[in-house]
Amino acid sequence: MTSPPFRTRIKFCGLTRPGDARLAGELGVDAVGVIFAARSKRCVMPENAGALRQALPPLVDLVALFMDNGAGEIHAAIARARPTLLQFHGDEDDAFCRRFGLPYLKGVGMGGAAPDGQTLRRRWPNAAGFVLDGHAPGQAGGSGQRLDATSIPADLDMPWLLAGGLTPDNVGEAIRVVRPWGVDVAGGIESAPGIKDGVLMRRFVEAVQTADATAIG
């Protein structure tokens, strides 16, 4: 596993409203995820993604998330959302993930029999990083299932984000225990699927910053 980062990166996922995207940027979040997977409760149509992109300030990444979408759907979403990163949560192989000319993250369900780091690197050698989620393989992300710390590969020597069941109340402890490169949250900062809660968003960022400050040294 890579050495603990000086600062834990923060990704808010499943945004559907421009106002939430704007607030995420103001709070200092590193990236926001916009979901184009039809199975998700937070799915956004490509024609609505442009407003989310316009709401983001400079230096905040927009991550377009897919799960077994067709290539045509992905091209359409990229044209509207203009993402800087892609994220795939389905059965996509490395060749498919990299065919769109953008760096990508691979989401992996770690519930049940979890793969080791070497297996992940071998299957997706061109991934920029991984999102390790608590759900079982083949299930959609955003389920809120916590990831067992013992499932995290000790030999994963590249950036990875911790996802699954994170909230403002537990993210600090999670960071102190597993020291991820980044954290990824959706339901833990919502009042309803796709509807972010400004107070929870702020508390989440503050909890991450506090955990980083207390972990230094």
Image (cartoon, rainbow, N blue to C red):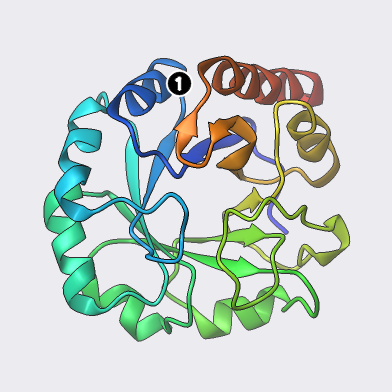
Mark 1, secondary structure of its residue: loop
The kind of residue tagged 1 is Gly
Residue at numbered disc 1: 28
Quick one: label 1, few (<14), some, or many (20+) residues within 10 Å?
Answer: some
Q: Position of residue 105 (x, y in %)?
A: 45, 61
Q: Nearer the viewer, residue 83 or 5?
A: 83
Q: Is residue 76 above or below residue 8?
A: below
Q: Residue at x 83, y 33 (%)?
A: 173
Above or below: residue 38 compared with residue 138: above
Residue at 65% across, 69% down: 109
- Asked whether, in this view, residue 75 is left or right of residue 176, the answer is left
The picture places residue 119, in percent across and down from the top left corner, at: 65, 83
Q: Residue 3 or 85: which is nearer the viewer?
A: 85
Q: Quadrant of residue 10?
A: top right
The image quarter in which residue 73 lies? bottom left
How many marks do you count on the picture? Answer: 1
- Residue nearer the viewer, 151 or 41: 41
Viewport quadrant of the C terminus: top right
Whole-percent x, y for residue 127 in the image: 45, 68
Q: Quadrant of the N terminus?
A: bottom right
Instruction: Identify the residue at horizontal 51%, vertical 42% (top origin).
Output: 193
Q: Residue 87 or 43: which is nearer the viewer?
A: 43
Q: State the image coordinates of residue 26 (x, y, percent, origin top left).
A: 39, 15
